[in-house]
Image (spheres, rainbow, N blue to C red):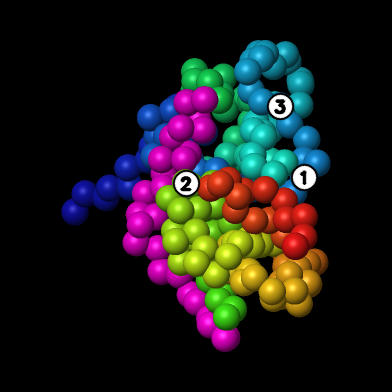
Amino acid sequence: MENRTPDRVPPSLQPEHDWSAASPLIRPALRPVGISGVDGRELRIPTGGSAPGKTVVKAGPAGLPIVYVLPGAGFDVVVSVDHLLAWGVGPDQVHAAAMANLGSGSAELAWTDEVSGRRKIVWLDRGDGMDAARILLGEVRAHLRSVLGTAGRVLVGLPERDLLIAAGLAEGDADFPALFAQYVADRAEAADEPIDDRVFELLDGELVEFVGI
């Protein structure tokens, strides 16, 4: 009997080196404010012995940084300038591919909800690493507005990578914002991969920082 070894993908065709392999996999991820990186528009070929290229970071809504990742076995590879040079593409092309991958199947997302009197809360915690980042999708923001906006304003929390939580703020419910803010802050503090402990809201379809009633 002939022994066969499994077919191996040549290193040059691995996602880290080949854009055609990377583009169906790449996705955006939110990171805490203050992360260092570059926008990827000024590409410089690394010199011998230089450190790995800087992370590609795009300014997101409400000051939230967006990075791009390739999912791996147990960890994500964060896209750097070195990747752009290897792929021969620019940051706009990377962003477009990442957002398209993030949006795939967004209409079929199964939201969990909880209703208590006038208060309604919905959230995503699928654990696939893309829960918080889905707030970048216009269709997700529109969905939140449609299911929560009838109560008034829509509050949003993005405390960690694997949680997107939103709630309707009914007129006259002065106690709720503080309760919601405390929950978001507690989740961010306890998270292995925190994002932000602020409360946001949807205003004219866009994510902005909540400034109070």
Image location of residue 81, percent across then percent down = 64, 25
Q: Looking at the image, is 182 positioned above or below residue 116?
A: above
Disc on res. 38: 3
| Quarter placement of the N terminus | bottom left
Residue occupying the far bottom of the picture: 117
Magenta stretch containing residue 9, yes or no?
no
Q: Nearer the viewer, residue 12 or 31?
A: 31
What type is the residue that disc 2 sits on? Gly
Up the image or down, 38 lies above or below 1; here it is above
Q: Which residues are magenta?
A: 92-117
Q: Position of residue 41 (x, y in %)?
A: 63, 18
Q: Nearer the viewer, mark 3 or mark 1?
A: 1
| Residue type, mark 1 in image | Val
Nearer-N-terminus badge (1/2) = 1
- Tag 3: amino acid: Val
Q: Which residue is mark 2?
A: 138
Secondary structure type for disc 3: loop
Q: Residue furthest left?
A: 1
Q: In the image, which is nearer the foreground, mark 1 or mark 2?
A: 2
Residue annotated with mark 1? 33
The quadrant in which residue 184 appears is: bottom right
Q: Calculate the distance from the C-alpha at mark 1 to the C-alpha at mark 2.
A: 22 Å
The residue drawn where x is 43% and y is 50% is 139
Q: Residue at x 58, y 69 (%)?
A: 168
